[in-house]
């Protein structure tokens, strides 16, 4: 069995040789060598080639590709090929197809056309997984197993009758009795009380607003159902291949919100994810950094694997511009700065047909004689020089809390504002701290918070009692806790905590909110300190906290907008609105200063810095996102340039330095 490349940051991507004539494969090997490719993910969408008809398998082509990759020293992350069924399967068994909320069957012709609850689909998928594991468990190219692909990207939620049956079973396991279900769902409202399990349906389209806890539980059910499927495939692999690591690629991007990856992460031998830059976002590179930190949090602080990203344009936005020169390298090294020890792309060779033919790849349509492929080769060479930092960890004194269940709940029906987007407060705080040179871990509320100097609690609408107690205990022990608007409102059943908002954090903050005043899109409220707030405002009555800023106009004029309360050895800070960037940056600077958090390095605006450390040393990452060169005070050896630097290092525009510190 080939060892996973650990003498470098692993570099490669999805390899789909079945798309190409056999003669191209040898050229692929030549170009992979030129680019420094050390691994490929193989067979993700190859089910129709491996099992062209029911029960008839054709592995010859895959045998040849595996042997070819082994001969060229390339490790294989081998997919189970179960991400998308072949056309014969859904033609013979149309009951496996998913159904949308309106009752429309989603037909084959794209990908992932299968119901997450379908026992029949699972039967065929596990049979293929078993065949794959039997055949390749001891192949010398095999270094990792890749189960399915981007679970839930296209087929969750499904509202079919099969899902209805399994949803009822899931509810029975969760609640035990109908009385407990009715209590959790608040079915006394609108005559929704259930007296038989068979009466419970998925939250299909209905006359008006649905039951919020019903919707929340269906999110939980969908995530749990696919996780159970994933574990079943992993167990089949384990029977034949117990010593090879197994993963599946998450999608830690702000637009993907269908799975609770905090539940999924413990089942991965190595956490891997896909991330694509979304140009429509206001701050796309800051979002990239945030979700790198989130992926590291899912991995418990350990290094993680970037399974997919793009060298340049994608194909699924309304407009898909190419990346400017140097962005392939800079985006990739940003992921390494946030903890990635592997850099994978979709895909190796840009397709000439199909829905993703205009999605960029390591080898573009223009071929090897192109600026993009030359940049790919440069990146591969840099990755080959980064072996010394593999296994090191990112240092962070600040935690930003992130909870998928809170995100589901705050996105439910009939909320005070449909314009409130769960990631906004978290992304904004993280971005401003990043701009200030402060690194954050993004972690679940159940994480041990005792090692952090600052903990940010952004829009944690739904929170359990133990999590709220853990946050309060951190403050008492010396942590500075920053709680934003619309946090602590509900319990895990999405029942409002009575007695005044912010419910679970009312005593910690020394603030009691009587009513909520969400702001309209584009609306702002003036603050007495000279700044402004947007998105949200709250009628906060101060009990035993210091008022740092207040509303200067509107119905809340004179009411507290920002407060601070000393708690034991620490402090609890409250933000009732989302301040403008300058105001919030100044507040965060005060918080971090009081908490003793120093920036990683002093750098100009637009330059990102992090530090990775291991027992053997430390590495300073300087990522210059600007159009001008910058200087940073650091002495050591720059692994990107392959040269000694210091005491002041110059980093060119749109470039990076990774300095092993002296």
Image (spheres, rainbow, N blue to C red):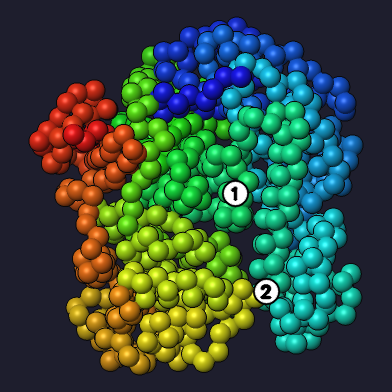
Kindly identify which residue carries mark 2: 213
Image quarter of the C terminus:
top left
Q: Position of residue 498 (x, y in %)?
A: 55, 89
Q: What element carries label 2?
A: helix
Position of residue 631 relative to residue 347, above or below, is below
User: Is 272 left or right of 370, judged from the image as shown?
Assistant: right
Does the CB distance between marks 2 and 1 fall below 8 Å? no
* Lower sequence index among marks 2 and 1: 2
Circle 2 packing at 10 Å, graded few (<14), some (14-19), many (20+), is: many
Spatial separation of the CA atoms under disc 2 and disc 1? 26 Å
Residue drawn at the location 40% of the way across and 54% of the way down: 441
Q: Is mark 1 on a helix, strand or loop?
A: helix
Q: Where is residue 371 in the image (x, y as percent from the top left)?
A: 34, 21
Kindly identify which residue carries mark 1: 266
Position of residue 370 relative to residue 490, above or below, is above
User: Is 408 left or right of 55, judged from the image as shown?
Assistant: left
Tally the marks.
2
């Amino acid at each position: 069995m080939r060892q996973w490349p650990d003498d470098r940051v692993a570099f490669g991507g999805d390899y789909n040789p079945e798309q190409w004539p056999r003669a191209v494969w040898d050229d692929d090997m030549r170009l992979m060598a030129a680019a420094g490719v050390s691994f490929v993910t193989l067979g993700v969408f190859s089910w129709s080639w491996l099992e062209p008809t029911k029960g008839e398998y054709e592995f010859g082509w895959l045998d040849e590709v595996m042997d070819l990759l082994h001969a060229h020293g390339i490790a294989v992350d081998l997919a189970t090929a179960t991400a998308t069924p072949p056309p014969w399967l859904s033609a013979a068994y149309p009951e496996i197809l998913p159904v949308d909320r309106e009752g429309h069957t989603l037909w084959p012709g794209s990908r992932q056309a299968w119901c997450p609850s379908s026992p029949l689909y699972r039967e065929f998928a596990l049979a293929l997984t078993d065949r794959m594991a039997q055949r390749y468990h001891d192949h010398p190219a095999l270094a990792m197993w890749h189960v399915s692909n981007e679970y839930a990207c296209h087929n969750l939620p499904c509202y079919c009758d099969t899902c209805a049956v399994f949803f009822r079973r899931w509810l029975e396991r969760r609640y035990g009795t109908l009385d407990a279900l009715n209590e959790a769902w608040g079915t006394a409202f609108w005559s929704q009380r259930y007296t038989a399990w068979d009466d419970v349906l998925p939250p299909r389209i209905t006359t008006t607003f649905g039951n919020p806890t019903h919707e929340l539980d269906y999110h939980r059910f969908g995530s749990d159902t696919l996780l159970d499927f994933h574990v079943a495939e992993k167990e089949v692999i384990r029977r034949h291949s117990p010593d090879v690591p197994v993963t599946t690629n998450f999608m830690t991007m702000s637009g993907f919100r269908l799975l609770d990856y905090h539940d999924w992460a413990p089942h991965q031998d190595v956490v891997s994810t896909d991330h694509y830059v979304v140009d429509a976002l206001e701050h796309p590179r800051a979002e990239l950094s945030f979700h790198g930190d989130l992926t590291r949090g899912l991995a418990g602080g350990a290094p993680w694997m970037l399974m997919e990203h793009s060298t340049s344009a994608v194909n699924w936005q309304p407009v898909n511009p190419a990346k400017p020169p140097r962005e392939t390298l800079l985006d990739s090294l940003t992921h390494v700065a946030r903890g990635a020890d592997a850099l994978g792309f979709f895909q190796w060779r840009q397709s000439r047909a199909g829905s993703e033919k205009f999605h960029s790849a390591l080898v573009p349509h223009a071929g090897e004689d192109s600026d993009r492929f030359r940049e790919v080769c440069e990146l591969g060479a840099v990755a080959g020089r980064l072996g010394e930092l593999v296994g090191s960890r990112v240092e962070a004194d600040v935690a930003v809390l992130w909870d998928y269940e809170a995100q589901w709940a705050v996105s439910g029906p009939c909320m005070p504002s449909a314009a409130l987007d769960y990631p906004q407060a978290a992304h904004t705080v993280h971005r401003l701290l990043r701009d200030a040179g402060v690194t954050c871990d993004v972690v679940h509320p159940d994480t041990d918070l005792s090692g952090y100097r600052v903990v940010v609690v952004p829009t944690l609408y739904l929170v359990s009692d133990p999590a709220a107690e853990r946050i309060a205990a951190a403050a008492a022990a010396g942590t500075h806790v920053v709680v934003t608007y619309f946090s602590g409102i509900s319990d895990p059943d999405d029942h409002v905590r009575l007695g005044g908002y912010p419910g679970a954090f009312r005593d910690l903050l020394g603030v009691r909110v009587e009513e909520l005043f969400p702001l309209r899109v584009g609306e702002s409220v003036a603050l007495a300190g000279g700044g402004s707030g947007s998105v949200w405002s709250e009628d906060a009555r101060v009990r035993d906290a210091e008022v740092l800023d207040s509303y200067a106009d509107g119905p809340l004029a004179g009411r507290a907008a920002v407060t601070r309360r000393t708690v034991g050895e620490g402090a609890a800070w409250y933000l009732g609105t989302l301040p403008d960037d300058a105001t919030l940056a100044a507040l965060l600077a005060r918080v971090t200063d009081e908490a003793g958090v120093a920036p990683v390095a002093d750098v100009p605006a637009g330059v990102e810095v992090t530090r990775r450390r291991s027992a053997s040393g430390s590495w300073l990452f300087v990522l210059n996102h600007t159009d001008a060169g910058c200087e940073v005070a650091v002495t050591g050896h720059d692994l990107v340039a392959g040269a000694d630097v210091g005491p002041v290092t110059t980093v060119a525009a749109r470039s990076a330095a990774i300095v092993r510190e002296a």
